Image (cartoon, grey):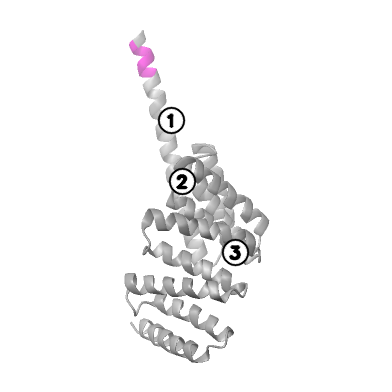
Amino acid sequence: MRYGRFLTALALCLVVASTVLAQQEKWNELNQQIVRLCRDKKYAEATRIAEMSLEVAEATFGADHPNVAASLNNLAALYKSQGKYAEAETMYKRSLAIKEEELGPEHPQVATSLNNLGTLYKAQGKYSEAEPLYKNALKIWERELGPENPHVAASLNNLALLYDAQGKYAEAEPLYKRSLAIWEKKLGPEHPQVGASLNDLAAMYRKIGKQEEASILEQRAKSIISRSGNR
């Protein structure tokens, strides 16, 4: 009798596991569709699929699962690209809360969510709200990944752009330079990302009247971008 109940329970577990696996595959396929649609600039359709992805994740895995956090982040990015900032903020905050609870507040994925939310605030001109998020993300990435990690370089550049947008050029300059130095070391002096970093610093120099320095950086960036385009 007990053996029969055991077999029944085992069969039920296998059915549940099979259902979850099927839903996981469906969720994966929806996310692949989102990537393809975004590549084709079909953002409205991508948003609809992203909403479906979130529904599948919540129904299958529960409201606090990492897959839900990923779906929330994808949907937030799509809302942001369409100027739906209030909706994007809600999604980014939910995603951040899940990651902090599941992974801990010092995890690199938490830094990614902090950075995403900061970028949303920057796009709206909410600089005072973006700054602490950028700083916290930078601190986490430096501590967890090391001071010369590419995530650190990107984070430094984001914070520099934020200060630049506010006219805080003295604060922005050393961040631009440190970001540039990391990209050069990690990717090589001829990488397109180095060219982009050079252009960011040059644009700031133009604003503050350092025309000669700006011209030198722009010429180097132009040379890098030209060579990369011919490869």
> Label for residue 202?
none
Mark 3 or 1: in front is 3
Question: Which of pointers 3 and 1 lies earlier in the amino acid sequence?
Answer: 1
In the image shown, does 111 or 167 lie closer to the viewer? 167
Residue indicated by mark 2: 26
Q: Tell me the distance, in whole angstroms, between the alpha carbons under discs 2 and 1.
A: 15 Å
Q: Amino acid at mark 2?
A: Lys
In the image shown, does 111 or 230 lie closer to the viewer? 111
Magenta stretch: includes residue 159: no
Residue indicated by mark 3: 81
Do we see residue 82 in this rendering?
A: no
Which segment is the magenta one?
Answer: 3-8
x%, y% of residue 87? 65, 54
Regarding mark 2 in the picture, which secondary structure is present there? Answer: helix
Residue indicated by mark 1: 16
Q: Residue at x 44, y 43 (%)?
A: 24
Q: Are marks 2 and 1 in contact (CB under 8 Å)?
A: no
Which of the 4 quarters of the picture holds residue 187? bottom left
Mark 2 crowd level (few <14, some 14–19, many ≥20, 10 Å Cα):
some
Height in image: 189 above or below 22? below
Which of the 4 quarters of the picture holds residue 184? bottom left
x%, y% of residue 160? 52, 70
